[in-house]
Image: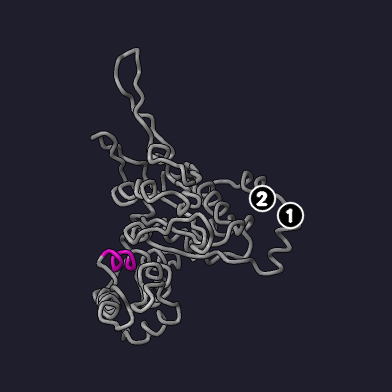
Amino acid sequence: MHAHAQSIVEQISTVIFGKERQIRLALACLLAQGHLLIEDMPGIGKTTLAHCLARTLGLAFQRVQFTSDLLPGDVIGVSIYNQADRAFHFHRGPLFTQVLLADEINRATPKTQSALLEAMEERQASVEGLTHPLPAPFFVIATQNPVEQAGVYPLPDSQLDRFLMRMHLGYPERHFEKDLLLLGETRSRIASLEPVLDGDAIPALQQEVAAVHTAEALVDYVLDILELTRRHPEVAMGLSPRAGQGLLRAAQAWAWLEGRGHVLPEDVQAMLPWVVGHRLKARTTLREFPPAALDELLAHVAVA
């Protein structure tokens, strides 16, 4: 593993036990200049992961608790009239940070959810005709409760597509959970984390990831995957070009984490479930394409 990545994973693992793969996935998502959706039950450690990642990377962090009465202005900011100079001044909201934790995003109304669309895609926010650039890097980690729970609004496909990756944390194994119970409160352990990197170094690392070599044969392999989803009889709608670009970026980030300067088919295969799992729906039920079906889909694509 890349030396920087190893240090980051090791430090975060002192707070979040037994989740090294998920930590690496979150880091890969950031380095690929994407955004991350974490879907799981409350109390699993979703918020803790976001906070630890920001602190370890030396990035500014803001958390917004999404609720049914949250308004777009509560996230983006509002213009307030100043009587002294008889003019409106824009007061920035929590959106203007480097790592934004959108906690329980599917508890907010679709109008508020959509307030993040421009920010996630364009890295900017438009308010009253003026465009305000967001800091670099800008990384959204959104948490989502299972749709079976009361009081949630399912994310529309356009919002889901803005997330490069989606993952689950899951319950910890028994011996890791025992350590967690014995150590008690995690807030003090988060506060004790020291930055492994300067936040200003992250854009340079993202450029390193973008420069990881992808052979033409590898690109053809990704194209074959995209085309198969578009003609598969059990898929409601095939993967878009944006999904293909995201899959390649994620594979580059995974290869970089592994300490390689080129992408292998194995990197694409490793990233596929996390990048396309929330983008594919079964034709008959319009529900998420099952993971086993993804494995079967890959088996039908020849490796160049």
Q: SS for tag 2?
A: loop
Q: Position of residue 181 (x, y in %)?
A: 73, 58
Q: SS for tag 1?
A: helix
Label 1 crowding class (10 Å Cα cut-off): few <14, some 14-19, many 20+?
A: few
Q: Front-most of 149 and 182?
A: 149
- The question of residue 246 being in magenta is answered with yes
Q: Front-most of 6 and 101?
A: 101
Location of the C terminus by quadrant is bottom left
Q: Which residues are magenta?
A: 242-248
Q: Position of residue 112 (x, y in %)?
A: 39, 46
Residue type, label 2 = Thr
With respect to residue 279, does 48 lie above or below?
A: above
Residue at left offset 29%, top offset 68%: 244
- The question of residue 158 being in magenta is answered with no
Q: Position of residue 99 (x, y in %)?
A: 45, 47
Mark 2–mark 1 Cα distance, whole angstroms, equals 8 Å
Q: What numbered label is drawn on residue 269?
A: none
Q: Magenta residues: mostly which secondary structure?
A: helix
Label 2 crowding class (10 Å Cα cut-off): few <14, some 14-19, many 20+?
A: some
Q: Which residue is mark 2?
A: 186
Q: Front-most of 280 and 58?
A: 280
Q: Are marks 2 and 1 in contact (CB under 8 Å)?
A: yes
Q: Which residue is mark 1?
A: 183
Q: Position of residue 282 (x, y in %)?
A: 36, 76
